[in-house]
Image: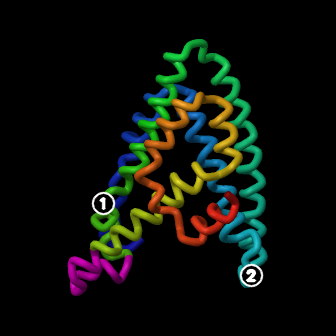
Amino acid sequence: MPPGYRFEASANDVAGFVLGKCTWAVLALTCHIELFSQAHYRASIGDAQGLSPLFKDVFLFHWKEESQHAIIDELEWIREDAKLTSAAQRDAAVDDLIALVRRCRRHPARPGESRRGVLPEHDETRGPRARCDVHATLLKAYRWQYIVSGAMQPRFQELLASLVDDAQMGRIQEALGPLMYAVPQREQVAREIAH
C-alpha cells in the first residue's frame, strides 16, 4: 500500500470483541464469511473471461477449501445450537450475533482517513464533496461485500431460519435493515425477479 496507508481497526481489539461473544454467534458469523467468500468467487472469478488460467485455478482450489470449511461450520453451528436449552439462551445468542453485525457495520466507518492517498479521489486538490462521495461509495461497497452479500445467501438464510424463531429472525433482519441500501442494483433486480 502507498505511504500513509494505515489500517484503523486493531486486530487484537476486533478479535477480543468477537471472541467475547458466545460460540453460537461466532459460528454464525464464521459460516456467513465462508459462504460469502464462495459467492464472491462465483460472481467475480468463476465464469470470468480473460483471466489468467493459473489465477483462476488458484482461486478455484481456494473456493473448494472454503466449501469444506462452510460444511464444517454449518455442522458445528448446529451442534452448538443443540446446547441452547432455553429461550433466554437463544435470545442471548441472537443478541450476540446482532452485536457482531453492528460492529461489522461500523468498520470501516472512516475509510478515507486510513486510505488517504490510495485512490486519486482522495487527492487534496479535489473538493470535499468528491471525497465524501468516495467515502460513501467505499463504505457501501464494504457493507455489501462483507455483510449483506453473505446474509442474502440462501444457504445461510435457510440455516439461520432453522435455528431461530420468527421473532428472533425479525430482530436480526431489523439489525440488517440499515445495510440493505448496499445491495447493488443488479442484485436487487434479481431478488425481485425471484419473488
133 or 116, which is in the foreground?
A: 133
| Residue depicted at x 64% and y 44% | 157
Q: Earlier in the sequence, mark 1 or mark 2?
A: 2
Amino acid at pointer 2: Gln
Q: Which residue is mark 2?
A: 49
| Residue depicted at x 47% and y 36% | 171
Vertical comparison of 176 with 167: above or below? below
66 or 93, which is in the foreground?
A: 93
Q: Which residue is farthest top? A: 85
| The disc label shown at residue 110, or none | 1
139 or 178, which is in the foreground?
A: 178
| Residue depicted at x 71% and y 43% | 69
39 or 113, which is in the foreground?
A: 39
Percent position of residue 20, x then y: 43, 28
| The disc label shown at residue 37, or none | none
Percent position of residue 109, x then y: 33, 56
CA distance separating discs 1 and 2: 34 Å
